[in-house]
Every structure is written in C-alpha cells, then in structure tokens.
Amino acid sequence: MGVFIEIVRPLCYNRDMGVRVKAYAKLNLTLAVTGVKDGMHTLDSLVCSVDMCDVVTAKRRADGKINVVMRGLGSENIPYGENNAVKAARLYAEEFSTCGADITIDKNIPMGAGLGGSSADAAGVLNAMDRLYGACGREELFSLACRLGSDTGYMLTGGYALLGGWGEKVVPVDCGARLDLLLLVPERGVSTAECYRGYDRRPSRCGGSKAALAALISGDKTALGASLNNVLYGAAKGICGDVERAFSDLKGFSPLGVNMTGSGSGVYALFDSAEMCAWAKSRYRGNARCYILKTV
C-alpha cells in the first residue's frame, strides 16, 4: 500500500479524535517518455512503494480554515500557496463543502529527489480528509488526486503499478515481491521541469516496462536488475553531476542493477538481500544521503 491509515487512538473511532496517515515514497523501476499531449509528456513507467514515508496527522476544525504545518528536511520553507498538501486539503473542503482541518506533516522523504514526496503528501492529506469527513468514494478521491499532480492518484494506494498517460492511468500489479534497495540522495536536487527540458533537447529511448514487469512477476531479481531503466537519466546527470557520481558509486558495489528514480536526483541500487544493502552502505564513502529501503 502507498498510504497506510490508522486512527490516532486505535480503540476509538470518533473522527474528532483525528487520524494519522503514512504516505510512502515511490521509486520508478522504469521510466520511458512515450510522447507529448497538450504540452505534457506522456509516460510508461513501472513504479513501486518503499518503506520511507511522511506522516500526516489531521484533526477536524469546527470552521472552514485549513491549517498545514510542515516539519523537517527544510519543508518549513515551502511557500504556503505552492504546497500541494495545502492545495489538497483546500480542494477536498471546497469540493465537498466540509469544514477545515489542522494538519501536520512530518517530512522524511527527501525533496527534489524523484521520490514523489510532494505527491505523497497531497495523497496523504486527501486520505486523511476523507477519513475525517467521509464525503466521497474512492473514484471521486482519485479524480481529485489527479487534479493535483500526475502521480498523486497512484499515491493514494501505492504498491506496484504501471503508470501511463501523464501518470493518471494506473494499472495495479498484483505482485508480492520484496525488493532490497540502497538509495543515494545527493544534497543538490534536480528540477523536474529543467530535466524534461533537457530531455527534449536531446531525446533518447530506453527499454520500457515490458521486460522489467515480466522479471518482477516471475521473481527473477537478476533479470529485473538488468531491466531497470530511466530515459531521463542523461538529462539529470547533465544538470547535476552528483547524479552521475552516485550512479558510479553504486555500480562499484556490483549490485543487480542501478537506476535513477523520477527526474532525480535520487539514485538506487537493487541488491539480492538486505545484508548486501547493509554491506554496501557500510562501505559507502560519498557525500550523498544514504538509505536502506524495502518495497512495501
């Protein structure tokens, strides 16, 4: 699941008590650009949720005010009017004429790393608001999410999925595979818009999702590692040299495969076991932030 919901006090189901939502990060196992429609790039991407999450805590208000507090990783500096979590709460309240909410988001997902943190927060807020007010069904919630960002609809539930279109076409992949990954996040992020502009100047092709999907479903981690791909990598490393450095550092540990997620700057390696991830992390001597991850 991409978003896990729990009542703050598990034995009490009074919505006024508030809810807590864990909004998980995602990794792109593949990412291909299939075209441009209405000025936006269309994609083919195999994605998964990993056990790194932001925590969204929400409580009802008696009035219509939306109050969002961000904590951690510099998220306090996100302009309030540009914050997708704020937009999500306001959209839900306006769409279904509900009261407002006091919302706190504790950030653990690095920003500007291609991990979908902004979309995860928006999806987490939508799920939290719906737990508080129960004003719509899942299809309506998904429709709202897609108005907030290309992969926000996917982030409502997460897991393994194939994304198409602008990311609004979500096909869940029924797969119980557990992947062990080591993620490097350079201090400098990569602008998604700048990365796509770089790609447009020098477009390239990659393997798409077919081989990776087959390997994932069959449980062949070696084949999956060989099938990891991201067509935006060339543009991202041209913008931020630390992306290429992270890629090279991870290759040096001889993993099953290395790939960049989203438009960067996060780069990850797939290993055969958690022990191999821990071994590689213990020997990493670079400057990037380093995380051991599992799929969820």
Image (cartoon, grey):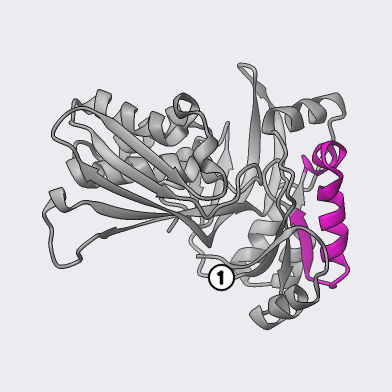
Say whether residue 137 is visible: yes
Q: Which residue: 78% across, 64% down? A: 257
| Residue type for callout 1 | Ala
Residue 209 in sight from this viewpoint: no
Instruction: Tell me: 278 left or right of 79.
Output: right
Q: Is residue 233 magenta?
A: yes
When the figure is inspected, residue 21 is found, relative to residue 132, above or below; the finding is below
Quadrant housing the N terminus: bottom left
Residue 262 x/y as whole percent? 67, 44
Apparent side of residue 213 relative to residue 167 in the rendered image (left or right): right
In the rendered image, residue 186, in percent from the top left (x then y), is placed at: 75, 51
Q: Position of residue 254 (x, y in %)?
A: 85, 72
Tell me if residue 259 comes above or below residue 222 in the rendering.
above
172 versus 8 height, above or below: above
Inspect the magenta stretch and tell me whether residue 90 lies in it. no
Residue at the farthest bottom position:
275
The residue at which mark 1 appears reads as: 177
Q: Residue at x 58, y 38 (%)?
A: 164
The percent position of residue 58, horizontal first and vertical second, equals 28, 46
Q: Residue at x 56, y 71 (%)?
A: 178
User: Dot 1: few (<14), some (14–19), or many (≥20) neighbours within 10 Å?
Assistant: some
**What residue sits 31% from the left and 35% below the top?**
67
Q: Which residues are magenta?
A: 231-259
Q: Secondary structure at mark 1?
A: loop
- So how many labels did they put on this image? 1
